[in-house]
């Protein structure tokens, strides 16, 4: 198993990175006559996705987490626009997954395998997006509930109350977009470190394992390529959307629809996880 926190969070970030950024993005193409500028989000705007599948495959300093699953009703809702620089977005979702984890720290070890079911598990968190370019600035995640798990050395599964909290820091804002968007536009991927400070344990405090996960991405020129709009059909409908893809390697493809003000579809594979998602409904005038 390779990592739940980094998994979910990294997948969330993979996805989040699709939605789920003004930092070091550099416009390397001439302006087009028709540009789509950054959307203006308002409190109450929301986008709901189905993420299926997502995969977490993480191994760092002896900590391993492997997870395979899906997220239904993965809803992102704008809850605060009062800050001059950032939008605050809160998300919730119904998590279904199988996992295998080994975590260790000075306070203890955790070696377990099991399942998450949406009737027993709650997923929620927050993301801060820059208003200037919808780049990802910061994220949090919480998974809480009851899991059917086998904890070594016990040979049988037990219902285990648990709570996992993660705080995700980016060394620089993640440039999902570089507005205004237009046909055949390019921008760079900055050098980026993603640090996840997590705490996993029982709800009743039976055990607590503090963990730190670190993932690094090198600077890459021409990493993002925005292509012409085309009609894309997802469960929420058919929309004219820009295709944004990685220029080197089959890392990600995602589609941004100006009329929706967000991503409507994504397929991404990062070094610690992968995710596919489609928009199922939205509230954006």
Image: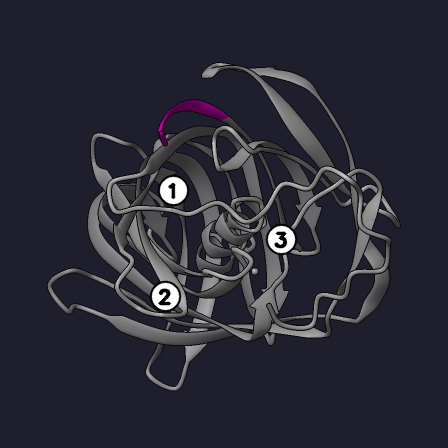
**Mark 1 sits on what residue?**
114
Under circle 3, the secondary element is loop
The answer to whether residue 267 shows anywhere in this view is yes
Q: Nearer the viewer, residue 54 or 88?
A: 88
Under circle 1, the secondary element is strand
Residue at (45% x, 60% y) in the render: 131
**Mark 2 sits on what residue?**
166
Q: Position of residue 195 (x, y in %)?
A: 52, 74
Gap between marks 3 and 2 measured at Cα: 22 Å
What are the residue bounds of the magenta stretch? Answer: 279-285
Decide if residue 231 is on the left or right side of residue 141.
right
Asked if the residue under mark 2 is in contact with the one under mark 3, i.e. CB atoms within 8 Å, the reply is no
Q: Nearer the viewer, residue 161 or 264?
A: 264
Q: Nearer the viewer, mark 3 or mark 2?
A: 3
Mark 3 or mark 1, earlier in chain = 1
Decide if residue 97 is on the left or right side of residue 275.
left
Q: Position of residue 198 (x, y in %)?
A: 38, 70
Say if the magenta span includes residue 208.
no
**Mark 3 sits on what residue?**
176
Q: Position of residue 245 (x, y in %)?
A: 77, 41
Gap between marks 2 and 1 measured at Cα: 20 Å
Q: Quadrant of residue 173?
A: bottom right
Residue at (37% x, 38% y) in the render: 115
* 227 shown above or below 162: above
């Amino acid at each position: 198993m390779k990592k739940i926190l980094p998994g979910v969070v990294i997948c969330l970030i993979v996805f989040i990175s699709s939605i789920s950024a003004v930092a070091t993005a550099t416009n390397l193409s001439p302006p087009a006559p028709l540009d789509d500028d950054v959307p203006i989000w308002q409190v109450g705007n929301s986008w709901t996705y189905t993420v299926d599948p997502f995969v977490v495959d993480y191994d760092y300093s002896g900590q391993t987490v492997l997870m395979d699953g899906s997220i239904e009703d993965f809803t992102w809702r704008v809850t605060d626009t009062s800050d001059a620089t950032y939008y605050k977005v809160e998300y919730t979702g119904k998590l279904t997954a199988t996992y295998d984890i080994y975590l260790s720290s000075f306070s203890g070890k955790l070696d377990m395998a099991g399942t998450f079911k949406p009737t027993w598990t709650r997923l929620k968190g927050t993301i801060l997006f820059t208003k200037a370019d919808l780049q990802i600035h910061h994220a949090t995640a919480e998974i809480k509930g009851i899991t059917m798990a086998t904890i070594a050395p016990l040979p049988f599964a037990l219902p285990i109350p648990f709570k996992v909290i993660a705080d995700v820091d980016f060394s620089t804002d993640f440039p999902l977009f570089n507005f205004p968007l237009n046909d055949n536009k390019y921008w760079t991927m900055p050098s980026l470190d993603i640090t996840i400070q997590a705490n996993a344990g029982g709800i009743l405090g039976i055990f607590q394992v503090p963990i730190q996960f670190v993932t690094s991405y090198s600077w890459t020129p021409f990493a993002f390529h925005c292509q012409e709009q085309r009609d894309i059909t997802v469960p929420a409908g058919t929309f004219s959307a820009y295709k944004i893809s990685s220029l080197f390697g089959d890392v990600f493809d995602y589609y941004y629809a100006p009329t929706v003000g967000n991503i409507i579809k994504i397929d991404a594979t990062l070094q610690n996880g992968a995710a596919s998602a489609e928009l199922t409904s939205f509230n954006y005038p």
